[in-house]
Image (tube, rainbow, N blue to C red):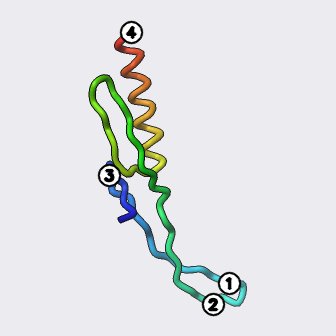
Amino acid sequence: MRTCSLCGKKSAIGRNRSHAQNRTPRTYKANIQKVSFSVGEDKISGSFCTKCIKSLKKEVKEQKTELK
């Protein structure tokens, strides 16, 4: 459900540690967002992590400058 369409990043499981060294389970959730990009006539849409969104925006920007 909470998975990046591009890289496959998803929630990870870990533990909280208190000062008394008690362990309690917790989840580290990936920052997944639904995004759609338009590259020329093509449209890319899906759920991406923020790292992939940043790289996709960079690629779209580079392609626009190449087309000019």
Q: Which residue is mark 3?
A: 5
Between disc 2 and disc 3, whose residue precedes?
3
Circle 3 SS class: loop
The image quarter containing residue 17 is bottom right
Q: Which kind of residue does numbered mark 1 sit on?
A: Ser
Q: Name the one closer to the observer, 60 or 15.
A: 60
Q: Are marks 4 and 2 in contact (CB under 8 Å)?
A: no
CA gap between label 2 and label 1 equals 5 Å
Indicate whether 63 appears above or below 59.
Answer: above
Vertical side of 57 occupied by 52: above or below: below
Q: Which element carries disc 2, helix, strand or loop?
A: loop
Which residue, as the protein is rendered here, is positioned at the far left?
42
Where is mark 1, residue-wise? 18
Disc 2 to disc 3, how far (Cα)?
36 Å
Asked whether the residues under the numbered discs 2 and 1 touch, taking CB atoms below 8 Å apart as contact, a structural biologist would say: yes
Q: Alpha-carbon neighbours of circle 4 within 10 Å: few (<14), some, or many (≥20)?
A: few
In the image, what residue type sits under mark 4? Lys
Q: Nearer the viewer, residue 34 or 62?
A: 34
Q: Which residue is mark 4?
A: 68
